[in-house]
Amino acid sequence: MMRGNRTLTIGISLVAFSLMMFLLSFIWTPYDPLEINPELSLTSPSWSHWMGTDENGRDILSNIVLGSRATLITGVLAVVICMLLGVTIGIATAMSPKWVESPAIFGTDIVLALPTVLFAIVLAAVYGPSTYTAVFAIGIALSASVAQVTRREVNVILLADYVTAARASGSRNLRIVRTHVLPNLRASLFVQASGASAIAILAESTLSYLGLGTPPPDPSWGRMMASLQQYLIIDPIFPLWPGLAILITVLGFNLLGDGLREALDPTLRRDVE
């Protein structure tokens, strides 16, 4: 599957790099990420501090490694929520009678029209900014697009001859979903989950940048960018590091989704012979 598929190879490599950084945060960081040392405020990269220090003298590399927890955990949990909701709603809508399907499609379109970040801002205004607010806001907002794509694909699957034969033999909807719908959706769900992960991580970083994500003192990449951007004129390299971490992770999941689509979709698969 990976042979000749550069997009998939690069995507897996970038995602693996981000996941390794996430796992590393549980066992090691160069310095205590929360240790404040005013004497080392805004020092340039050196052998002691490879990425320099922030305005409080904290090691930037250590904060980026630890910040991967908040960003990736929030993104993954949001994707789990969006996939569970989206797939369930999409399948249920496709297999429901018209009088149920039409209102469900209308409701999905309403959620799709509401930007993820705006939805999170509304929830944060009601319940206060927190990791849980970001997770649920991102998950619910992304579930609409998953539901829409899933519904369309299930409608195609339900027109297949083997589904018609299964219904003629007396199979109930639940059995049809388990034996025919879900196996044929597997490839699409992998691609959707990868794309949703990229959007969720970018949305979490945006919320943290706005102060609506993971609250301090736990570091997050978005909040690091917000705190370091004011020193852009002094040295542009300071906000570069958290921005680069976000870029690598988001690009990795996007390329992973594109590579999976190319590998799993026969109409897009390259001739590697």
Image (cartoon, rainbow, N blue to C red):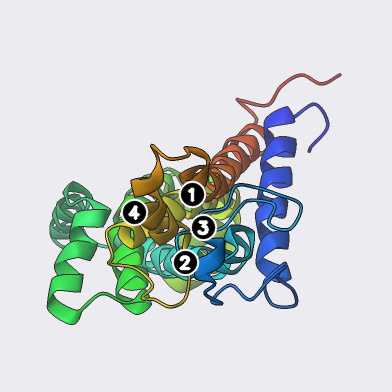
Amino acid type, label 3: Val
| Dot label at residue 5 | none
Determine the CA span between mark 4 and mark 3: 36 Å
Residue at horizontal 58 percent and vertical 35 percent from the top: 258
Left or right relative to 209: residue 49: right
In the rendered structure, which amino acid carries the disc numbered 1?
Answer: Ala
The crowd level at tag 4 (other Cα within 10 Å; few <14, some 14-19, many 20+) is: some
Visible in this render: residue 171? no
Disc number at residue 206? 4
Using the numbered discs, state the Cα–Cα distance from disc 2 to disc 4 in whole angstroms.
23 Å
Say which quarter of the image contains residue 8.
top right
How far apart in space, not on screen, are marks 2 and 1 (Cα)? Answer: 30 Å
* Picture residue at 14% right of the left edge, 53% below the top: 110
Q: Give residue 231's position: percent from left, percent from top.
A: 39, 46
Q: Tell me whether the residue at label 3 lies in contact with that at label 2, contact meaning CB atoms closer than 8 angstroms.
A: no
Q: Measured along the vertical axis of the image, is residue 35 above or below residue 188? A: below
x, y percent for residue 57: 53, 65
To which residue does mark 1 refer?
198
Q: Residue at x 76, y 19 (%)?
A: 271
Mark 3 lies on a secondary structure that is helix
Q: Nearest to the eye among marks 1 and 3: give it.
A: 1
> Could you tell me which secondary element the residue under label 4 belongs to?
helix
Categorize mark 2 by other alpha carbons within 10 Å: few (<14), some (14-19), many (20+): some
Dot 4 or dot 3, earlier in sequence? 3
Question: What residue is at 39 percent from the left and 64 percent from the top?
Answer: 82
Q: Which residue is mark 2?
A: 56
